[in-house]
Amino acid sequence: MGDEGDLAADKHVRYIVTVEKKKDSFESLVMEHIRLNGAYWGLTTLDLLHKLQAVDAAEVIDWIMSCYDPESGGFGGNVGHDPHVLYTLSAVQVLCLFDRLDVLDVDKVADYVAGLQNEDGSFSGDIWGEVDTRFSYIALCTLSLLHCLHKIDVQKAVDFIVSCKNLDGGFGAMPGGESHAGQIFCCVGALAITGSLHHIDRDLLGWWLCERQCRDGGLNGRPEKLADVCYSWWVLSSLIMIDRVHWIDKEKLTKFILNCQDIENGGISDRPDNAVDIYHTYFGVAGLSLMEYPGVKPMDPAYALPLDVVNRIFLRK
Ligand code: GRG
C-alpha cells in the first residue's frame, strides 16, 4: 500500500479549485451542461481531502439555488437548464456537504422526484420519460436524504430493481439489460438504502465484481473492457455493500489509481498517462477512500457522500 505521500492531495485540491475558476477552459466548456454534477464531484473530493473550506460556501449555495426550477421542484445541470433527477440529486448532495438542506423547499423537491415514479415501480429521469435503474437509485437516494421515502411506493421500486437482476448475479439498466458495474452500483445502492439487500446472491455477485480486476490492478466495468479509475468506485462500493470487498487486491488497485495522477498539475485520469478530468479525480479519490487510504475521509458506499455527512443527516433526525 502506498504511503500518505503518494497521493498528491494538495495538487488535486488546487486542480479542482482552478477548474472551477477557469470558466473558458476546455473542461469547463464540455462540462457546461452537467455543471451541477461536476460541482458534486469536485466539492465531494475537496471534502474527502478535508479542504471544503477552500471554496466560499455562500457563493456555492447561491449558484446551486440558481439551477433550481421552482415550478417543477427539480434542478437543472446549469442555470436555466431543464430539470432532471440526476442534477436534483447532485444539488441535494452538495447541500448535504455544507449542511444547508434548510435552503430547500423539501416537500416541493421530494414531490418532483416522487412524481417521476412509474406504475411498474421504475423511475423516469425527467418529463421525457427515459427509464433506467440509474434513475431508481437517484430517486431513492434523494428521497432518503430528504427523509421523504414515504412519498413513493418503495416496494414497487424494489420489485422493479429486482426485475433487472441477471443470471450472472449482476444488474442492468432495465429488465434483460447487460450487467454493468455502474448499473450494479445503482441497484445495490438502491437495495441498501431500502434495506432490501436480501434480494442479492452475495457470492455470485461478489464473484462477478471481483473478476473486474485486470492484470494492471485497475477495475473494468464489464468483461473484456479496459480498466478505468471510475470503476474503483462503482465496483468497490458494491463489494462493500455486499460484504465481499476482501476479494479485491487493494494494493494493486491503489497503485493503479495513484499511477493515474498528474503529480505536477493535479487531477486523476481514467488510466495512466491520459488527460485528467474532474470526474476521474473524484472517483479516484473516492476509491482510495473506500480502501481506507490515509488522510482521506471515509465514504458511505450507498449515499456516495463522506460518512460524517451521512451520519449528520440520519443521526440528527
Ligand atoms: C451519486 C455516485 C453517484 C451516482 C449517481 C449517474 C449515476 C447515479 C450512476 C451512473 C452509473 C453508471 C452507469 C456508471 C458507468 C459510467 C460509465 C463509465 C459508462 C461507460 O460505459 P461504456 O460502455 O464503457 O462507454 P465501458 O467501460 O463499459 O467500456
Image (spheres, helix red, strand yellow):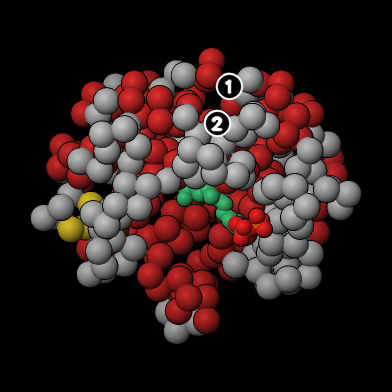
- In this rendered view, identify the residue nearer to me: 153 or 267: 153
Q: In this view, which residue lies farthest toward the top?
A: 198
**x then y, percent, for residue 187:** 50, 34
Q: Is residue 200 left or right of residue 101?
A: right
Mark 2 and mark 1 in contact (Cβ < 8 Å)? Answer: yes
- Residue at image location 40% in from the left, 25% down from the top: 159
Residue 257 position, x and y percent, is: 75, 53
Q: How many marks?
A: 2
Taking the view exactly as shown, the residue that stands out farthest to the left is 71
Q: Quadrant of residue 101?
A: top left
Where residue 156 appears, as percent x and y from the top left, is: 33, 25
- The C terminus, quarter of image: top left
Left of 213 or right of it: where is 122? Answer: left
Q: Which residue is mark 2?
A: 165
Say which amino acid is labelled 2. Lys
Of residue 314 and residue 75, the one placed in the foreground of this image is 75
Q: Which residue sits furthest right?
A: 215
Residue nearer the viewer, 27 or 17:
27
Q: Residue at x 15, y 52 (%)?
A: 72
Do we see residue 313 in this rendering? Answer: no
Residue 112, above or below 64: above
The quadrant holding residue 118 is: top left
Q: Which residue is mark 1?
A: 200
- Mark 1–mark 2 distance (CA, rounded to whole Å): 9 Å
Q: Is residue 236 above or below residue 264?
A: above
Identify residue type, mark 1.
Answer: Ile
